[in-house]
Amino acid sequence: MNQESVIIRCTKCGAKNRVPTNRLQDRPVCGKCKAPLIYYDRPVHVTDGTFQEEVLSFPGAVLVDCWAPWCGPCRMVAPILDHLASQYAGRLKVAKLNVDENSLTASKYGIQSIPTMLLFKNGNQVDRLVGALPREEIERHLLQVL
């Protein structure tokens, strides 16, 4: 019997776990350390208050979309990031930071134009993409981090 599965990296110990997709709703745990496995298949919203926990303390790759609701190019990129979050679920966390509501973090990372996408790996910024880029270009940068 061939069933689809995803690989989820444990946020506690870093072990890779193969989980059947039909078991994702059953709150799977890491086979090594028994910590709950967190599966991000859609973007999470981060704020100045949650940025440290959601992005900098995350043991793995995070793509942070710095955006604003009034920004047309940001709305063009949003479906691409939704798709990438789903496609790379278990290997990548996609986060969205509204720069109008979270000016401290936007200022700290020097966000001067939007959309700006910041790529983090194990809490360290490793890349920055500016502008409404095509999916292939964003994915090319992602694959260098994953």
Image: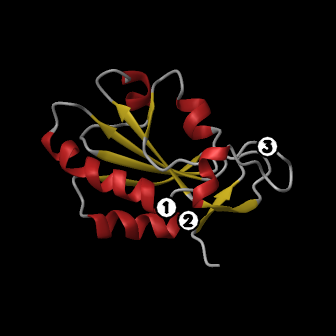
C-alpha distance separating marks 2 and 3: 22 Å
Q: Earlier in the sequence, mark 3 or mark 1?
A: 3
Quadrant of the rendered image containing residue 19:
bottom right
Q: Is residue 86 above or below residue 4?
A: above
x and y, in percent, of residue 18 in the image: 69, 64
- Classify residue 87 as left or right of residue 20: left
In this rendering, the label closer to the viewer, 2 or 3: 3
Report the amino acid beneath label 1. Tyr
- Classify residue 57 as left or right of residue 50: right
Q: Residue at x 49, y 61 (%)?
A: 88
Report the amino acid beneath label 2. Leu
Q: Secondary structure at mark 1?
A: loop
Circle 2 is placed at which residue position? 146
Residue 73 visible in image: yes
Q: Residue at x 38, y 66 (%)?
A: 139
Question: Neighbour class for label 1 at 10 Å: few (<14), some, many (≥20)?
Answer: many
Asked if labels 1 and 2 touch by Cβ distance under 8 angstroms, the answer is yes
Question: Neighbour class for label 2 at 10 Å: few (<14), some, many (≥20)?
Answer: few
x and y, in percent, of residue 68 in the image: 25, 32
x and y, in percent, of residue 144 in the image: 50, 69
Report the amino acid beneath label 3. Ala
Asked if labels 3 and 2 touch by Cβ distance under 8 angstroms, the answer is no
Q: Secondary structure at mark 2?
A: loop
- Classify residue 5 as left or right of residue 117: right
Circle 1 is placed at which residue position? 88
